[in-house]
Amino acid sequence: MNAEIAELEALCKLYMQSNPSFADKKDATPAITEEDIASAVSNGLTFVSQVSTLSALLQEDASLIESSEAERASLDFLAGAFAKMASEAETGSKALQKGIARSAFAATYTKLARASADQVNQDGVSFADLNSFVTRCFTDNAQIVQRIADKALAEKRAA
C-alpha cells in the first residue's frame, strides 16, 4: 500500500511539473461587478423610455420614422405592457397583491434588453430586431430630427 501511495505521489508531482498552471484555479465565468449590474439596469430603463418616446412619436405622425408594420406592432405591444403596468400600479394595494402586469412588463422588457430571438407578438418582429430598431432610431436619428424640424417649419408657415 505504501508503494502505491508513493507511486501516486510521484505521478502527481510529475503532472504538476508538466502543467505549471495546475494550481491556477481560474473561474470560467467572469465576475459580475456592481457597475455591470448598474449598467444593465440603466440600459433596461433607457429602453422603456425609448420605446415610449418612439410609440408616442409614431402616434403623433407615423411618417416621422421609417418603420415597418411589424416594428410598429411590436412597439405598440411594448408600450401597452408599460401602460398596463402603470395602470395596475395605480390601484395601490390591489397591485401589490396581483402584480400580473408588473411581471409581464418586467419579462417583456428583459427580453428586449437581452435581444431575445423570441417574437414580440404575432404581428411583430423579434425582440432582437426591435432592440436594433430602437437603438438605431436613437443613435442614427438625423433623418428623424430633420423630419420633425421640417414638420414644425411647415406648421409655422401654415399658421
Image (spheres, helix red, strand yellow):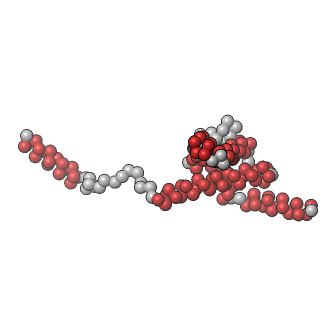
Occupied quadrant, residue 121 = top right
Residue nearest the viewer, comparing 149 with 20: 149
User: Looking at the picture, how far across and down is residue 68, in whole percent?
Assistant: 73, 45
Residue nearest the viewer, comparing 12 with 64: 64
User: Looking at the picture, how far across and down is residue 35, in whole percent?
Assistant: 49, 60
- Can residue 31 be seen? yes
Quadrant including the C terminus: bottom right
Q: Is residue 123 above or below residue 129?
A: above
Q: Is residue 12 above or below residue 121?
A: below
Q: Is residue 17 left or right of residue 7?
A: right
- In this view, the residue farthest toward the right is 159
- Can residue 74 be seen? no
Residue nearest the viewer, comparing 64 with 75: 75
Q: Is residue 44 above or below residue 81?
A: below
Q: Is residue 140 left or right of residue 9?
A: right
User: Looking at the picture, how far across and down is residue 84, in whole percent?
Assistant: 67, 44
Residue at horizontal 78 percent and vertical 49 percent from the top: 59
* Count of numbered circles in the view: 0
Residue at horizontal 7 percent and vertical 40 percent from the top: 1
Residue at horizontal 64 percent and vertical 52 percent from the top: 48
Residue at horizontal 62 percent and vertical 56 percent from the top: 46
Residue nearest the viewer, comparing 70 with 77: 77
- In this view, the residue farthest toward the front is 93
User: Looking at the picture, how far across and down is residue 100, in whole percent?
Assistant: 60, 40
- In this view, the residue farthest toward the top is 122
